[in-house]
Amino acid sequence: MDIKHYFIEKGQGESLILLHGNGENCDYFVGQIDVFAQYYHVYALDTRGHGKTPRGDASFTIRQFAEDLRSFMDEHEIEKAHILGFSDGGNIAMIFAMKYPERVNRLILNGANMDSKGIKRSVQFPIEIGYWFAKLFANKSAEAKLHAETLRLMVNDPNVKQEELSMIQAKTLVIVGTRDMVKEDHTRLLARHIPDAQLVMIEGNHFVANKCPEAFNRTVLAFLQDE
């Protein structure tokens, strides 16, 4: 692989991988790492081109990030893991679980979406305008190019079809905020098409893990520990 992930590692037991959202880094999970590390071997990654992980030369897409995750697991001899992804991290986790079902124990999708149509227009429209402007300056510097690529993820990825969700074999929790930027009907559609998925809505916005960590952590741990 052309990059080495920066990551935080803590705890012992079954592996639990945390994947942050667009434009963020593993610090997003400040309210989760120590709590989950009491029960699991936690790995919180910086995605390619985010935080302290370099951009590298490969494509900058959700599907490439899923391949990066496979390489990370291979490198660290993680045969199978629980995977929790937030926003674009949820999209990475979703793609990964579809392609490598044998590598996923339990799956938590927090604020994930199948495509940009699943995002409320009041949120998506400014992103599209920002991407249009960012493309104009993308050739000015590496930073400008990365900024445009990061916005592009929210415009053109992940483009998952409903019928593809049946490829997910892991027991799955879909979790969102009651005032999430992902449309409620889109979230319900997502959960409905993943076999036997559970759907939980927590009072709050898109960032419930960060803003409401106690409720979020309690819900995730109950799911992971449910026999």
Image: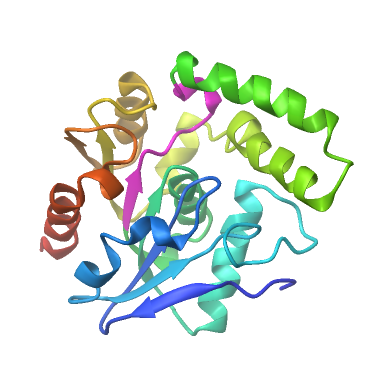
34 relative to 227 in the view: left or right: right
Q: Quadrant of residue 107?
A: bottom left
Is 154 on the left or on the right of 224, as rendered? Answer: right
Q: Residue at x 37, y 70 (%)?
A: 81
- Is 73 situated above or below 151? below
Along the line of sight, which residue is nearer the eye, 18 or 71?
18
Residue 178 sits above or below residue 49 on the image: above
Percent from the top left, x then y, of residue 134? 75, 31
Say whether residue 67 is visible: yes
Range of magenta residues: 107-119
Residue 117 highlighted magenta (yes or no): yes
Q: Pick the residue in front: 69 or 44.
A: 44
Q: Is residue 220 magenta?
A: no
Question: Residue 63: percent from the left, percent from the top?
Answer: 62, 50
Q: Pick whichever, 132 or 172, lies toward us.
A: 132
The image quarter in which residue 19 lies: bottom left
